[in-house]
Structures are given as C-alpha cells and as structure tokens.
Amino acid sequence: MARKTGSHSQITGPKIREQALQLFASHGFAAVSMRQIAAAVGVQAGALYLYTPDKEALLFDLLKTHMDELLAAWAAEERGAGPMAALEAFVRFHIGFNLSRADAVFLSYMELRNLGPENFAMIEGLRRAYETELEEILKAGQEAGVFLIPDTKLATMAIIAMLTGVTTWFREGGRLSRAMVADIYWDMVRKAVGA
Amino acid sequence: MARKTGSHSQITGPKIREQALQLFASHGFAAVSMRQIAAAVGVQAGALYLYTPDKEALLFDLLKTHMDELLAAWAAEERGAGPMAALEAFVRFHIGFNLSRADAVFLSYMELRNLGPENFAMIEGLRRAYETELEEILKAGQEAGVFLIPDTKLATMAIIAMLTGVTTWFREGGRLSRAMVADIYWDMVRKAVGA
DNA sequence: ACGTTAACTGAACGCCTGTTCAGTATCAAA
DNA sequence: TTTGATACTGAACAGGCGTTCAGTTAACGT
C-alpha cells in the first residue's frame, strides 16, 4: 500500500491541523503522540512529516494561525464611536470569538511553554498586541473621563481573564445563550470600569 | 550504593512533592518524567515509588492537598459582617492565597485532564465547593439588595476567573505590590456587582 | 497511453517512558 | 554489638516516542 485513493494535500493538511488542535486541547501537547494524530486523520505517522517539519512546528502553526486570525478578526470588527462603544465591541467580540474557538484559545494559553524561545516570543508578542488593543481603549476612556480606572494595565489583564474564562464553563444549549452571556458580561465590565 | 547517609522519609517525601509540583507547573504533567523528578530530588527514579504508587497518584496528591488547604484556609478566614464585607474578604483572600501558591493554582486548573475519572470528580467537587462559597455570598448580597447581579452563577465564574488571572502577570517586586493589586481588584469587583 | 509527480506506507532507528525488584548500605532500638 | 526496619541503588522490563526513508501506488498533464 502507498498512496490512497482520493488523497489530496488540500484535504489531509487541514485534517491534520484540525485533529491535532482537538487532541492537543483535550490531552495536552506532550501527552499526544504523532501516531495518535495520524490515527485520527487516517494515515500513518510518517505521512505527517509531509506537512510539518516536526511536532513543535505543528503546535506553533496552530497557535500562530489562531493569533493571526484573532487579530485580523478584531481589526475587521465594527467598533462604534467613543471609548464606551469600543469597549462594548471588544467585550462582545472577545466572548464571541473565544466561544467559537475554545480549543485554540485554550491551547494558546496553555501550551506556550512547549515552544522554543523564538517561537514563544513570537506568540507572546501577538498576544501582547491583542491586549494592547484593549488597553488603548481603556486609556482613551480614562483620559476622556468616561472610565474611572486606577490602573489601565491591571484592568486590561483583569477584563481579559474574566472574559476568556467563559470558555471554561459555557456549554452550548445550556441555561444561558451566547447573547445572554455577552449581555451579562458587558454589564459587569461596564460597571467595573465606571465610577 | 544503597541507602544514603542522612536519608529520611520525612525529608525525601516533601522534597518529592515540592519538586514534582514545580516541574509539573512549569513543563506540564505529561512532559515531566519520573527520572526528572528523581534527579531534582537527588535520588534514583525507583526511590519515588516508596512515596507514591504511580505518577498519576503523585499529581492527585498535589491537587488534593492544594484544594484541601484552600478550603481550610478560607474556612479559617475572617469574613466580617454582611455580604459586602464577605465579598471583600473573599477577593482579598483569593488573590493572596493564589499569589502565594501560583504553581499549585496553575496545576489545579490545567492538569485535571490527566486524572482518571474518579480522581477528576473528586478535585472537581472540591473546586465546585470553593466556587459555591463565593456564590453564596453573591446570593446573600443579591437578596439583601446590596448587589445588583443579573446571574449569580455567571458572576461567580467571572469573578473567580478575573481574580485567578492575577497569577499570570503578577511579578513580585514589580510596579505594583500585592496590597495595591488587591485594592484595585477589589475596587473593580465591588463596582461590577453594584448598581 | 505514458511518464511524472504527489501522497502515503511500513519498517526501522536510537532513545526515553513508567514501573519493578533483588541487592545493599544506613539508621535506630535492644 | 547485634538485629531488624528503613531508604535507596542500579539494572532490567516491555512498550512507546519522534523521526527518517526506500519503496509503492494514485492522480494528472501531455
């Protein structure tokens, strides 16, 4: 046996990333073997190396793609006029994006430590860029007198942690819908940054 | 070579748990080998099995101990009179406790997935018990008209996520002291649950 | 129909894994 | 000083790890 009928790199490539993402997120990077990923895709382990130079590069690819898409999606988002509208847009965007990609979000927070120094720095930089987006909104609101925040950097971290945490408990089809969750979180954030 | 001079189970036992905690927290449970832990302690890998039946039991022991101590510490905490004072006590306690045990906190949030079903359920139950402590405060405040919270369960998760996140960015000797951080977080929480 | 390229297999590489255990040195009590 | 109990070594076990590669088959342009 060698090449399989109907096999195409445009199918296998995405399949590998998809299965790797799911497996890494549920069991952890180190706990998942290349053979497990291959089995989930339906190929032998050796075939994975047509798509990635090594295991760490596969993880990096997943994280880099996620961060790029996150920043691109936020850049494309409507954010209204003024700090208050911008903050609301950010809160709703962050919750929506994170809920739709819980696996990738989890990975990007948990598995950075499995990256080499330069790959780590790259992802960390992108994360910081995203955090800066929120901090700029808070700073603008603070200067405009719309927000009352003792420390914008701390508030940035606090708000992001609070919002990101939604992925740990939210279940589709549960007591609360996504829209209701977003409404309630926005209510809490709005009050927290206010007078 | 066999027994080492000055060797005692009361020294080696804690040393193993201490090193395992640190290694698991920085590299992840699956990425750390028994030989690495043994080397950090200064013994051979086989010696670890005088102190734990297997690797997973070692992890479980660390998590169980941490959760027990967390609940015991909160139970022993002064919490003042009324929901507002209780909430403030909880916020300050949670930040203080988590900052003093960042490794264990990180582990208990990240490595639950490496536990078997019944061990997982045990730790999850303890965590839920801790979360319930906060939720009861929020419920009491809501009923007393002191807080204005659309959903106490969501608010519980939001506040815990926000507070726990402090361990990801706080560095001792940085721009802000622990006390300042606690003050600012309390300010945000107080406003978030208010009118 | 043919030849080339793309996709994959399956076996092998050396190394590391968690765990067990017979043997041995140290400690503490008598 | 002898005697157990305690603490540990070092080698071994079977199996899994990431990774490489010669060989094989399917797909596709001509």
Image (spheres, coloured by chain):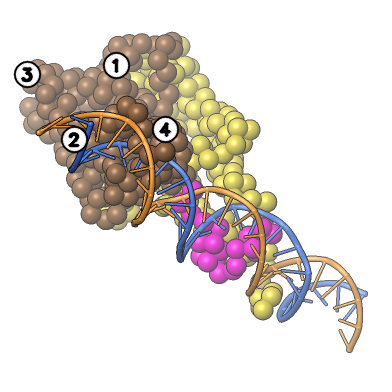
Chain colours: A brown, B yellow, C blue, D orange
On the same chain: label 2 and label 3? yes
Earlier in the chain: of badge 4 and badge 2, it is 4
Task: Tell me: B132 left or right of A9.
Answer: right
Relative to A49, residue B41 above or below? below
Compare marks 2 and 3 and give the one earlier in the sequence: 2
User: Mark 4, chain letter?
Assistant: A
Which of disc 3 and disc 1 is earlier in sequence?
3
Q: Mark 3 points at which residue?
A: A81
Nearer the observer: mark 2 or 3; the answer is: 2
Kind of residue sitting beneath label 2: Asp
| Whether residue B109 is visible | no
Q: Mark 4 points at which residue?
A: A42
Chain identifier of the residue bearing label 2 in the image: A
For marks 3 and 4, the one nearer the N-term is 4
Query: Which one is nearer the viewer's eye here, D9 or C22?
Result: C22
At 35% from the left and 47% from the top, the residue drawn is A55
Few, some or many residues within 10 Å of mark 1 (<14, 14–19, 20+):
many
Query: How far apart are labels 2 and 1 at the CA level?
Result: 23 Å
Q: Which mark is residue A182?
A: 1
- Disc 4 residue type (three-letter): Gly
Name the front one of labels 4 and 2.
4
- What percent of the width, then of the height, locates residue D20? 34, 57
Q: In which quarter of the image is the C terminus of chain B?
A: top left
